[in-house]
């Protein structure tokens, strides 16, 4: 395939199917995309102002590899206030989004022959990170009947002598599911009993609906958990590339080595803006406004789906996704997505983009303006009625 020699582990990385669908959609006029996995909101003003001020104040230099101490302090305070958790600053590294935090966890903790348990369906980056780390991938099926949460018995059955890590992601992309406390405890107990790491990817922790709560894995298995988190979704800051990992300090020390030489640090003024994001009530007011807006949109989509033939929706309590069951249409997920794009000019993501077990589902993102969402639902309903 390549004219040049490319290392096998890089050759194995898949181009995201999501991107391919977007490219196809770009060539069609008047398309509404419900495929996007990022907030459509602008970053709150106080955070933008803080970044501008930081530039003027000379935050234009290299930063410590672990991140600016005051930002790490602000992250630590945040966990204290939000979850009553004690996170020493030595247990924190500032990363280029949750993507980097996840990558560092795989690269630092896994080696060839190790196995990692990745849910199915799951967000796309974990399997690719595992390939880069040359680790074996074992998929843990998530089922609608279980609210797309891991079944502890099934998890136990997948554990072998080689298992080193399990990936957990709640609120979940692509299903929107949240995890209840009982499941969080069960997963934590298993990780402790079998001496496994838990990579817990929690960037949607603030997008919760219908009174749902978030149970951070750090609370239940603090010595086993590597937490990946991000400012991307919470504060609508995807392009800023600001996130962090929390883990036992000995692990962080080694993650810092990779981070320093492989990736490099997040821009200093962006880190300073992160301090403002975490500490200012203004940013938290903006987060709550966004959450309320998502909650309205979520209801629009769920109510609309109830009126459509052939499809049904699992009622998620988190993130900004609906995982709709399309099995009754008789189409595969990919066929459905392509059909909907042609017939209704609406983009949804086939569930199989997130693993084999996503077959029979499509992911609908409601990180889209209300008017567009309503129009997309109308088009979908019409297309399905004509099926
Ligand atoms: N983890 C999950 C579950 C996501 O959905 C995303 C982005 O879509 C990421 C991680 C990456 O986020 P970041 O922008 O923080 O790198």
Image (spheres, helix red, strand yellow):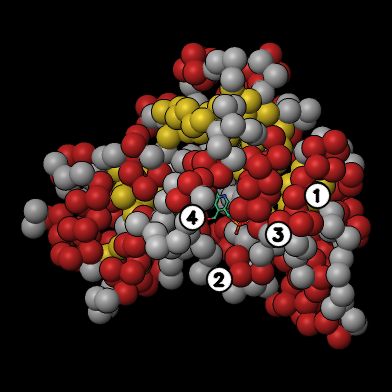
Residue 158 visible from this viewpoint: yes
The answer to whether mark 3 and mark 1 are in CB contact below 8 A is: no
| In this rendering, the label closer to the viewer, 2 or 1 | 1
Measured in 3D between alpha carbons, the distance from the residue under mark 3 to the one under mark 4, in whole angstroms, is: 20 Å
The disc, 2 or 3, on the residue closer to the chain's N-terminal end is 2
Q: What SS does tag 4 mark?
A: loop
- Residue bearing mark 3: 263
> Toward the viewer: 152 or 140?
140
* In-image side of 315 versus 262 (left or right): left
Near mark 4 (Cα within 10 A), the count class, few <14, some 14-19 or many ≥20, is few
Taking depth in this image into account, of 107 and 9 the one nearest to the observer is: 9
Q: Earlier in the sequence, mark 3 or mark 4?
A: 4
- Residue that numbered label 1 is attached to: 256
The response on whether ligand 1 sits within 8 Å of label 4 is no
* Mark 2 / mark 1, whichever is N-terminal: 2
Reading the chain from its start, which is encountered first: label 4 or label 1? 4
- Inter-mark Cα distance, 2 to 3: 28 Å
> How far apart are the two marked residues, 3 and 1, measured between alpha carbons?
10 Å
Measure the C-alpha gap from mark 4 to mark 2. Answer: 39 Å
Q: Which residue is mark 2?
A: 41
């Amino acid at each position: 395939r390549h004219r040049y020699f490319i290392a096998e582990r890089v050759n194995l990385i898949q181009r995201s199917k999501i991107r391919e669908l977007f490219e196809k959609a770009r060539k069609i006029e008047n398309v509404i995309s419900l495929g996007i996995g990022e907030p459509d909101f602008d970053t709150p003003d106080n955070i933008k102002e803080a970044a501008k001020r930081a530039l003027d104040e000379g935050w234009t230099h290299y930063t410590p590899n672990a991140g600016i101490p005051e930002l790490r302090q602000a992250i630590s305070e945040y966990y204290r206030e939000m979850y009553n958790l004690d996170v020493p600053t030595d247990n924190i590294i500032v990363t280029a989004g949750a993507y980097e935090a996840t990558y560092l966890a795989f690269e630092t903790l896994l080696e060839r022959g190790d196995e990692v348990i990745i849910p199915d369906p799951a967000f796309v980056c974990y399997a690719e990170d595992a390939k880069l780390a040359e680790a074996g991938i074992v998929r843990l099926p998530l089922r609608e009947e279980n609210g797309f949460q891991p079944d502890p018995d099934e998890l136990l059955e997948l554990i072998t002598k080689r298992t080193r890590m399990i990936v957990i992601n709640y609120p979940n992309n692509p299903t929107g599911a949240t995890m209840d406390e009982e499941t969080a405890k069960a997963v934590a107990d298993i990780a402790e009993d079998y001496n496994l790491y838990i990579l817990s990817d929690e960037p949607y922790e603030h997008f919760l609906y219908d009174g749902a709560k978030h149970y951070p894995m750090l609370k239940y298995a603090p010595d086993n958990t590597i937490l990946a988190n991000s400012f991307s979704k919470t504060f609508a800051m995807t392009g800023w590339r600001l996130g962090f990992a929390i883990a036992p300090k000995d692990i962080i020390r080694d993650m810092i080595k990779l981070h320093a030489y492989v990736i490099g640090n997040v821009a200093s003024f962006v880190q300073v803006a992160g301090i403002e994001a975490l500490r200012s009530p203004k940013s938290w007011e903006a987060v709550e406004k966004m959450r309320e807006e998502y909650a309205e949109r979520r209801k629009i989509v769920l109510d609309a789906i109830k009126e459509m033939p052939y499809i049904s929706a699992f009622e998620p309590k988190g993130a900004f996704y609906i995982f709709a069951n399309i099995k009754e249409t008789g189409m595969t997920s990919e066929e459905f997505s392509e059909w909907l794009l042609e017939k209704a000019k609406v983009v949804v993501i086939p569930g199989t983009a997130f693993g084999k077990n996503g077959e029979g589902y499509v992911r609908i993102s409601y990180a889209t303006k209300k008017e567009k969402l309503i129009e997309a639902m109308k088009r979908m309903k019409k297309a399905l009625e004509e099926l």
